[in-house]
Image (cartoon, rainbow, N blue to C red):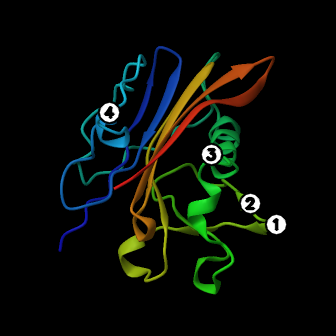
């Protein structure tokens, strides 16, 4: 089985976009993270196809109004702390704690914590036999963010929308669906 890992960093219109796709085909659309019976008034985050094997050059210092590595870290931490996700992680099981997260091609230096322990960052999920939470898309803009993830061992996909209020990120909307 072939796995594709790609990352695109787009610096335009005040946004930093990190998209990570893992699997044998193209990344799933935004509709795949939502149940068929639900409709969302939100437009899916625009991103380039994630089928390129060449990682983009890492972003240096963000320009005025763009998201920083600290913003990406804060957004991802809020997603990990989401009460809708926590029951599916089963951190009481030894093979699931500490939590393992696939973060290939995300900014260097990100440090995340779940249930009092640092998250184990996994560059190559195919080489790791433990359950791994995979961030499929992380799109952080100046005042809004969206994150899509999957946790294959539980057969779930999740989508979160976040916004910045008074200089702090908050989780605005979260949805976890079972497949």
Q: Residues within 10 Å of mark 3 (few under 14, many from 20)?
A: many
Q: Quadrant of residue 61?
A: top right
4 vs 9, left or right, is: left
The local secondary structure at tag 2 comes to strand
Describe residue 73's horizontal placement relative to residue 152 as left or right.
Answer: right
Q: Secondary structure at mark 1?
A: loop
Residue 58 in view in this figure: no
Give percent across and percent down for residue 16.
51, 30
Question: Residue 116: which numbered mark, if any?
Answer: 1
Residue at horizontal 32 percent and vertical 33 percent from the top:
37
Q: Which residue is mark 3?
A: 79
Instruction: Estimate the spatial distance between the alpha carbons at disc 2 and disc 4, rounded to whole Å.
Output: 34 Å
- Does any portion of residue 32 appear in the rendered image? yes
Nearer the observer, disc 4 or disc 3? 4
Sequence-wise first label, 2 or 4: 4
Residue 129: x and y in percent read: 43, 83
């Amino acid at each position: 089985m072939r796995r594709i890992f790609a990352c695109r960093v787009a610096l335009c219109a005040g946004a930093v976009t990190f998209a990570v796709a893992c699997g044998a085909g193209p990344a799933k659309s935004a509709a795949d993270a939502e149940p068929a019976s639900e409709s969302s008034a939100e437009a899916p985050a625009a991103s380039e196809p994630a089928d390129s094997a060449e990682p983009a050059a890492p972003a240096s210092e963000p320009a005025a109004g763009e998201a920083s590595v600290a913003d990406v870290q804060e957004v991802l931490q809020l997603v990990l702390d989401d009460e809708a996700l926590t029951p599916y992680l089963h951190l009481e099981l030894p093979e699931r704690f500490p939590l393992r997260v696939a973060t290939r091609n995300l900014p260097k230096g990100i440090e995340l914590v779940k249930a009092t322990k640092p998250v184990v960052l996994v560059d190559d999920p195919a080489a790791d036999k433990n359950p791994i939470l995979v961030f499929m898309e992380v799109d952080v803009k100046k005042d809004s963010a969206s994150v899509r993830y999957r946790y294959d061992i539980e057969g779930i996909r999740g989508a979160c929308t976040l916004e910045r209020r008074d200089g702090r990120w908050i989780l605005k909307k979260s949805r976890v669906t079972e497949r």
